[in-house]
Amino acid sequence: MNFSDSELIATILTKQNFQFVDSADQAEVILINTCSIRDNAEQRIYKRVSELQHLRKKNKQLKIGIVGCMSERIDDEKMIEEGKINFLVGPDSYKNISNVIFQSENERVTDVLLSHTETYEDIVPEKLIEQGISAFVAIMRGCENFCAYCVVPYTRGKERSRPPESIILEIQSHIDKGVAEITLLGQNVNSYQFSNNLKIITFPLLLDELAGFFPHVRFRFATSHPKDLSDELLHIMAKHQNICKSIHLPMQSGSSAVLHRMNRKYSREWYLQRIDSIYEILPGCTISTDIITGFCGETHEDHLETISAMKYANFFHAFMFKYSERKGTAAAKTMDDDVSEEVKSERLTEIIAIQTQLSKKHNERDIGQVFEVLVEGVSKRNDLELMGRTTGNKVVIFEGDLKMYPPGSYAKVKIDECSSATLKGCVV
Ligand code: SF4
C-alpha cells in the first residue's frame, strides 16, 4: 500500500512540474513515506530523519517532509518544532502536497486531515521504477475494523472504495506497459463496496468483472479479512482461471479468547471453517497468514491453540511477530501487555520453527507436479536460471533463458526439489 502511495504522490508532483533526482543530496525536497504498523518501522523513520539532517548544512533551502501514516501519529509535532522536518502530509492530503511544500518556505506546515471520500480515483499512478511484470492497484483505502492492537484505522481513516471505471483505467495503463499480473490492494480488500445508481458492486462482483474484462492478466488481492471472505468470492476465484489460487488470510491467533480481545470479529471456529471452505471450493489453493504471538493475556493454552490452528490450516507461508504495544490503540489504553518479552520470544521461535516445517512439507508435496509459472526474470543467484511464480504464489527456479521465456510469459515447470521457501524444477 505504501509503495502504491509513493507512486500516487510521485504522479501528483510530476504533474506539477517537480522532477526526480537520483540521490538525496541532489534534492531540494525530500519526502519520507511512512508506515506506522509496527514500532520498529517508526523507529527507522526517526533514524532516517536524523541521518538526513547533515544535508541541511550543504543546502539551507532543503525541505524534509513526512508523508503517509506516521504523519497522523506525530501528534506533538516534536520533529517539526525541533526543525528536523518542515512539513507533515497525511494519506488523504496528497493532492495538496505541492501547496504544503511551497507554504513550508516560510513556516512549518501540517496537513493531516483524514477524509471520508478521497480515493484518488481521478489519478492513474505512474510507475516509479521499471515495473517488471507485476503492478499493484489500490482499490480501496482505510479500515474500520479497529483491531485492538492496530493503528491503521487512526492513520488511514474510514473505508472508501474506488469506482470500478477508475480501477479499469489504471489496470489498462499497466497492461499497456507490459504488466501481466495485477495485485488489487486494500487494507481490507474484500470489504470493497462501491454503489452507483444501478447497483452495489461488492468485491466478488468487481473481481468477476475484472477477471472477465482482462482475461490475459493474472489477478491477486491483499489483504483479506476473514470475516469478509465469503463463499461467493471463493466461487468467483474458482470460475476464473486467471485469478490466482492463493489467499493471504491473517489469522493473528488460533484462540477464540485472544481473537475476542483483539476485536478480530471472528472465532477460531469461524476461521477454520473459512479454511475448510477454501480447500473445498478451491482444491490446491495456497493460504498464507499473519500471526501475532504474546498478545495481552495470551496463555500457554492459547499459544497451543495457535499452533494447532496453524497445522490444521496448513499455511504455506506466514508472517509472524511478537506483540508490541502501539500508542493510541484500544489494547494500549485498556489492556495489560502482560506476556513477558522472554515468553513472547520463546513462543515466536516455536511458531517460526513449526511454520518452517509446514512450508517445507507443503513444498515437498509439489515435487513431481507440473506448474504453470509466470516468468518474472533471471534468478538472483544464478544467471543461467529463471525465476517465476505459480498461481499459488510459490517461487519457482528453473533452467532457461529470457529469449525463450521473456518476463510475462508462462513456462510449464516440473518440480524436482524444494526448500521451505522455493521450488526448483525444469521445463517440460
Ligand atoms: S483489519 Fe484490523 S489489523 Fe487489518 S488494518 Fe484493519 S484494524 Fe488493522
Image (cartoon, rainbow, N blue to C red):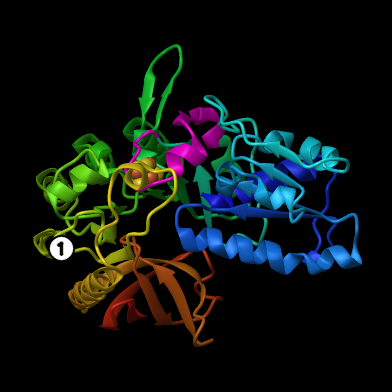
Q: Residues within 10 Å of mark 1 (few under 14, many from 20)?
A: many
Tell me residue 394's x, y (percent): 34, 68
Q: Nearer the viewer, residue 82 or 243?
A: 82
Note whether residue 133 is visible: no
Determine the residue positioned at 90% across, 62% down.
59
Vertical placement of residue 156 versus 362, above or below: above
Left or right of residue 158, residue 428 in this image: left
Q: Is residue 164 magenta?
A: yes
Note whether residue 225 is visible: yes
Answer with the quadrant where ligand 1 appears in the image. top left
- Three-letter residue code for mark 1: His
**What residue span does the magenta drawing correspond to?**
144-168
Vertical placement of residue 384 versus 112, above or below: below
Determine the residue positioned at 55% across, 51% down.
2
Tell me residue 327's x, y (percent): 44, 48
Residue beneath disc 1: 303
Q: Nearer the viewer, residue 172 or 301?
A: 301
Left or right of residue 97, residue 177 in this image: left
Tell me residue 427's x, y (percent): 36, 78
